Image: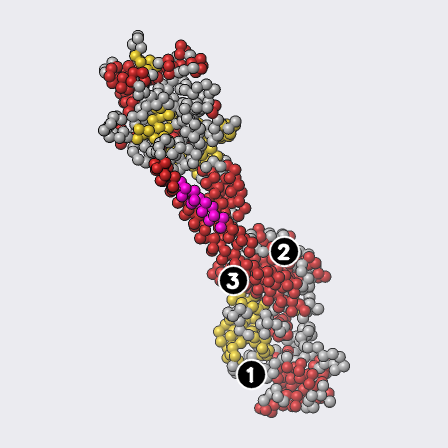
Amino acid sequence: MKLAQTREARALAVAAVARGLIEPNALWDMACRWTLGGASTPQELFEGILTPEQLAALPELLAQEGRSPPAARALAPQVDDLDALRFDTQREIDLPGEEVVADFPTLATSATRAVNAGGSRYEVGEALGAGGAGKVVKARDREIGRVVALKTLKPGAEADSAVGNRFLTEARITAQLEHPNIIPVYDLGTLPNGQPYYSMRVVKRQSLQNVLTNPELRKQWPLVRLIGAFVQISRALAYAHRRGVAHRDIKPENVLLGDYGEVYLGDWGNAKLLSRAEVSEPITIDPSGQDFGRKRHEAVASALSGTPGYIAPEQIRGDQKRIDHRADIFALGVVLYEILTGEHPFDAPTVLAVILATQTRDPKPPRSISPSCPLLLEDLCLAMLAKDPDQRPPTADRVAAEAEAFLEGAKERMRRREEAIKLCELAKAPLERDRRLDSERERLVEEARRLLKDVKEYEPIERKRAGWQLEDRAAGVEREQARAAAEAIDLYTKALAYDPDLVEARAGLADLYWSRAVRADQEHQHAARIYHEALVAEFDVGRYAALLTADAVLSVDSSPSGASVLAYRYVEKDRILVASDERALGRTPLREVHLKPGSYLFVLKRAGYRDVRYPLLLKRGTHHRVEVNLYTDAEIGEGFVYIPGGTFIAGGDAQAYDPLRRAELHVPDVAIAKFPVTFREYCEFLNELESRDLDLALKRAPHGTRGSEGYVARPASGGGWEPLPTVVEGDAQKRFPAEEGHLWNLPVILIDWFDAVAYCRFRSERDGIEVRLPTELEWEKAARGTDGRFYPWGDHFDPTFCLMRSSRPFLAQPEPVGTFPIDTSPYGVRDMAGGVREWVADVNGEKSWVETSREIESTADAGSDAPPWRIARSGSWAADSQQCRSASRTRFFGITRALNLSFRIAKPLSRGPGR
């Protein structure tokens, strides 16, 4: 084969490629065919590739080669013989593309071989984008009929030979990188105006940057989908690295996403061949230079090649021996970091700051920004961002493999999550059933109490059966509720076995356990509360974390202001709640004082006013706003204790006798007698009655049903009424000798409700103030304070704490008031658990004090109307521990008299105008 024919074939092939008649890759097939003798003449070589008309025009193409514009001649190979376009037939023939050809021509040396692209092949359309020295427009290839993206230099840029050579290098490198995730190059040539161009596939330019910064787009790209795109880009980069090409400008803007799931690594304009790449010299950063005041993503005029924030530390240092393909892996790690966190690892306000941060600052772990970030991806990302190239993954293939390992696990996790979500949906039914049954149980318990409250213990079963049946139903509902809760817990637990991080399952369990913790707290079951709160903390997804550890906040106003406030926290000592750890909070008004949750006693002091004891249960995460009225001693009255207005926990004690339903209720200011009315006080009333009407005095005198023998008080020989010595018997007489005046300090007994009301009228008239019996809520608040304790002193009972039937080794009987100092409420009211039962003014929820006060006093005579019911509170010297609970209530006919039945008085308080 003659050398002249070989040169002619080579020249014609190059001209045909420049003309767009054949694809560049066809040159390899033609070279193989020519070298192996598959064609004897240049014309035969092109048969089957060119049309007859194009074959006939080959001589004209050859003649045009020498007259092509300078840019087109850059396409001619820089070789003098066939060795540049043939394979050695004595060696194994490799597929083309194992290594990108490095010996690219420059724009100047190619001037003699450029082939004009013709004047009408491309119909130029709208601009698609621009950057640096190049621009991209949409164009229609008339010969093939497809729409392409045509990239050219901006007008005037071709005058810069370095720019032109870079453009040709970009085109040739990109053309030889045939990979599904690299935009393919179709054609390379020059336009009629002499501008070099290359054409490529049109990709809708939605970049990864658009997705990461647009919340609406981000919703369409969950993490699994983004990592799938990341894997494709990593594979494309690995392919380029194997071909000896470094990208050098990897960033989200250069990752393009098509409408149909295509992912491309674009903009290879900064690429270089690793085998002959020139490494950047160390740069000198001038802080006064204007370039370094720009934002991170703006172009920078410096010796560095790439985008600040994505340039590897070794490139910044100019460490020539260590700059290789791993610099691309660093940039890819920055992209992964942005995918995982939505933030840049080296973000800073200026380019200078970004470069310094890249060199010196370790990025925050992604999970510290996004706690849901998978550990595997966090480890991969941080490894890719290592300052030392040797600490990074060695290849982009390794990066892709690690990310794919996550995706494989993610697919399984997605399937398991779907199963877990199904289980959570199933758990909704038993969870709702649990809540419904809880309400039903409370309703049945309340209804049973209502039916049984009027039934005496000695009455026959027939009178009790309906209430018992309701109690049995309530117990059955409670069992069913437990089964519903167990079913919900089982389903949520199974869901977490499929997906330990599933928010729905964890939140469901946290809600369920929180309801149990609240119930345990209400019932003062402290161990159960601690247990369930621990479970809440284990499964909480953020709803209860702050609440479980939050302080309580207190603000206090007083009228008048300027009162000093002391805080005491209740702590249990010997089973009694004791106010301890005094802390001065300042003077009112107080604003937003932070305190640990718990039960407190606050004492307000101001000169000229009675000290105020204000117990308060401080709840976690709650701002308690307290308004306290101050009263003088004269306003409150001697022998009275001030109960400041506010809310308290009423009822709700399952162990109490006929308690009210649990509720937080408000009670206005009121003053309650420190002790029950004594014989001394009541005899003063009888003396006043006797002075007007002896029969009326006898009617109101404390007595039983045995006629004159039933009286426990009598007119004294010297005048005036006095208690009988027989009120105290046996060993109690030795303990409380009559001659020492103890009888006068006994609480008056054998008093019916109407007697008590008559005494209140007497006190009102005598003292010139309104005196009445306390209401149920006033009495219970005065006894319990605000924290829902079971007894005035706390939650534990011992017979020595109050006067009840087991308190003495001798016969139980009345004792003087104040004998048991532990039986003191948080406000300082005495004898509210034991001693004597006490009439109250109303029947809560049924009859108000106004209504009861209007009812006519009746008798138990045959044929008369049934006497009205009334409520007595407190235990007594004859009572058991259940009746001593502060929430216990006992119903009696209003005309009932008993040796353990008495009363105490109260007076409403209100702040007068102008105070």
In the picture, the disc for residue 379 is 2
> Whole-Å distance between the Cαs marked 3 and 2?
22 Å
Residue drawn at the location 50% of the way across and 72% of the way down: 127
> Whole-Å distance between the Cαs marked 3 and 1?
44 Å
Residue drawn at the location 67% of the way across and 63% of the way down: 395
Vertical side of 331 occupied by 664: above or below: above
Q: Position of residue 417 (x, y in %)?
A: 53, 58
Q: Give the secondary structure at mark 3.
A: loop
**CB within 8 Å, label 3 to label 2:** no
Q: Position of residue 876 (x, y in %)?
A: 40, 24
What segment is highlighted magenta in the picture?
Answer: 471-487
Of labels 3 and 1, the one closer to you = 3
Looking at the image, is mark 3 or mark 2 earlier in the sequence?
A: 3
Of labels 2 and 1, the one closer to you = 2
**Nearest the camera: 451 or 677?**
451
Residue type for callout 3:
Trp
- Residue at numbered disc 3: 221
Q: Quadrant of residue 902?
A: top left
**CB within 8 Å, label 3 to label 1:** no
In the picture, the disc for residue 118 is 1
Residue drawn at the location 69% of the way across and 67% of the way down: 274
Q: Residues within 10 Å of mark 1 (few under 14, many from 20)?
A: some
